[in-house]
């Protein structure tokens, strides 16, 4: 085993959507910086960013009911929905900038237009959805939303869901046609293809084993070259840990105060995937329902059209599962080795406070296929068991930490950015809506970690993201400009006139 050393300006750990996004932003802002990426797997976007390991929802709060809470006074809190939507608009602007500059090509390969819908059943839920709709359409970000509780209209919107429905129970849905399905794996690889055409150094089959501070304040990263069985040492003034579920262990190795009293709880996801093309063709939307009482936010059931490998697919889920691994390709010891002296009390407290979540996960794990089919039939009444197969999606590690509001051992649902006081190292933890908000999260990282550069970078950032520094909800005209420009750059309007099978046929003819 040999050892080699090198120095670089920036080190990115993990070749997922977050590192790809940060690398792309930095290369546009400071092209002369040396950036090095280390990824344990053989290519980019193969863990959390992989198309089979996430729902592919371009999270814009168009369909997720858990982003809009009903307050004690009956009003609807729009703050999270507004924030998430604005973050996704930022992502679309940056992707459009890259497409317009020929830095990435063929956007239809990673983003497709797809209606986003919310569906509820029962008088109380219909009443809530109507109230939610009336609130949301007053917000310029959601003014295109439609509502219907008319069965005939719903048959046009969601024929597969309405077919064979014999119950007289009230049912209603909202719909926005401007939703999307995003293949974050393809997008990640496109970004890295572009980055590798510059002098950015991407190292696959390289596992980061340790991170520690040097006497001069830089960071020393120890890396195992898995292909050649070599141990390498790299130093950098800035390190980003974007390794998905693997980020927590590496953050703990840094020893920074901000890494203390943080734990992680792994949750795996499973989806039912339709294998009957006739059934698949009857549905064209992402339809999100309402989580059952007592179920965690991650359990919101949804029936999704997906575009994978040039084919239209249909997925239903998620069904929660449990594995102590923090990554799908991780170790069974991940959970136990993440428990340290500083977070032991935090983890124990979380375990006590989340006994109901543990019970829920156990119940989910032992579900039979027929029990899963019963849940699917709440969406598709005449679903046949032989038309559906079970697939395991990716691992998510929910952040556990002590908070002022929740107290010790609070389980967090969402994305968490952790950075040192001096901004020299940062890590991204957590889960949904992660990938959809990658550009906003990485801009936030740059503001916190490179405050000395932000003023000089701002003109270029505004060129890439016209809404930067503005609240879209306060600028309706800008919203419309962005919708128009991003739809044009990403070919979203043109794609509504075709489908993946037609695109494949066209591509074959063109190649011939």
Image (cartoon, rainbow, N blue to C red):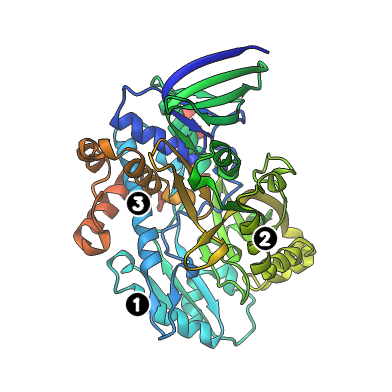
Q: Is residue 227 above or below residue 364?
A: above
Question: Is residue 369 or residue 334 the one in the foreground?
Answer: 334
- Marker disc for residue 493: 3
Asked whether the beta carbons under mark 3 and mark 1 sit within 8 Å of each other, the answer is no
- Horizontal and vertical percent position of residue 176: 40, 65
Q: Nearer the viewer, mark 3 or mark 1?
A: 1
In the rendered image, residue 198, in percent from the top left (x then y), is placed at 38, 21
The crowding category of the residue bearing disc 3, from other C-alpha atoms within 10 Å (few below 14, some 14 to 19, many at least 20), is some
> Of label 1 and label 2, which has the lower sequence position?
1
* Foreground: disc 3 or disc 2: 2
Q: What's the residue at 29%, 32% (across, down)?
A: 29
Q: Is residue 371 above or below residue 20?
A: below
Report how far apart the C-alphas of labels 3 and 2 lie in the structure: 51 Å
For the N terminus, give its image quadrant. top right
Disc ID at residue 348: 2
Residue that mark 1 sits on: 135
Residue at x 66%, y 73% (from the top left corner): 381
The quadrant in which residue 290 appears is: bottom right
Q: CA distance from mark 3 to mark 1?
A: 27 Å
Is mark 3 in CB contact (under 8 Å) with mark 2?
no
Is residue 282 shown to the viewer in this render? no
- Residue 391: give x, y in percent of width and height: 70, 51
């Amino acid at each position: 085993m040999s050892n080699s050393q090198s120095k670089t300006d920036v080190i990115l750990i993990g070749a997922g959507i977050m590192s790809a996004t940060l690398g792309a932003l930095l290369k546009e802002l400071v092209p002369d910086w040396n950036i090095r990426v280390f990824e344990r797997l053989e290519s980019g976007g193969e863990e959390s960013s992989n198309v089979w390991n996430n729902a592919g929802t371009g999270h814009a709060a168009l369909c997720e009911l858990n982003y809009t809470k009903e307050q004690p006074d009956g009003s609807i809190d729009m703050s999270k929905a507004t924030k998430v939507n604005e973050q996704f608009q930022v992502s679309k602007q940056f992707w459009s900038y890259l497409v317009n500059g020929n830095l990435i090509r063929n956007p239809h390969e990673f983003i497709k237009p797809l209606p986003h819908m919310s569906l509820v059943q029962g008088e109380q839920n219909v009443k809530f959805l109507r109230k939610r709709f009336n609130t949301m359409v007053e917000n310029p970000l959601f003014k295109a939303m439609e509502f219907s509780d008319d069965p005939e209209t719903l048959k046009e919107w969601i024929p597969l869901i309405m077919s064979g429905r014999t119950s007289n129970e009230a049912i209603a849905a909202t719909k926005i046609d401007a939703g999307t399905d995003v293949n974050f794996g393809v997008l990640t690889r496109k970004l890295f293809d572009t980055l590798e055409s510059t002098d950015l150094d991407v190292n696959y089959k390289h596992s980061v084993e340790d991170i520690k501070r040097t006497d001069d304040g830089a960071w020393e990263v120890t890396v195992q070259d898995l292909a050649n069985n070599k141990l390498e040492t790299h130093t950098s003034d800035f390190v980003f840990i974007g390794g998905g579920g693997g980020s927590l262990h590496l953050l703990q190795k840094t020893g920074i105060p901000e890494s203390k009293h943080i734990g992680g709880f792994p949750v795996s996801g499973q989806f039912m995937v339709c294998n009957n093309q006739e059934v698949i063709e009857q549905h064209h939307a992402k339809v999100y329902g309402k989580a059952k009482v007592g179920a965690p936010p991650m359990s919101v059931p949804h029936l999704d059209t997906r575009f994978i490998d040039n084919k239209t697919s249909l997925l239903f889920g998620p069904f929660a599962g449990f594995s102590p691994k923090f990554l799908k390709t991780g170790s069974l010891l991940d959970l136990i080795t993440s428990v340290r002296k500083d977070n032991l009390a935090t983890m124990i407290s979380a375990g006590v406070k989340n006994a109901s979540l543990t019970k829920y996960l156990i119940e989910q794990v032992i579900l039979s296929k027929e029990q899963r089919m019963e849940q699917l039939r709440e969406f598709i009444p005449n679903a046949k068991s032989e038309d559906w197969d079970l697939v395991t999606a990716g691992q998510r590690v929910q952040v556990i930490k002590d908070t002022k509001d929740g107290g010790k051992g609070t389980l967090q649902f969402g994305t968490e950015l952790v950075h040192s006081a001096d901004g020299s190292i940062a890590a991204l933890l957590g889960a949904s809506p992660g990938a959809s908000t990658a550009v906003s999260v990485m801009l936030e990282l740059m503001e916190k970690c490179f405050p000395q550069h932000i003023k000089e970078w701002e003109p270029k950032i505004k060129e890439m993201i016209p809404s930067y520094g503005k609240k879209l909800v306060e600028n309706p005209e800008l919203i419309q400009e962005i919708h128009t420009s991003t739809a044009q750059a990403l070919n979203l309007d043109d794609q509504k006139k075709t489908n993946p099978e037609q695109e494949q046929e066209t591509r074959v003819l063109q190649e011939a």
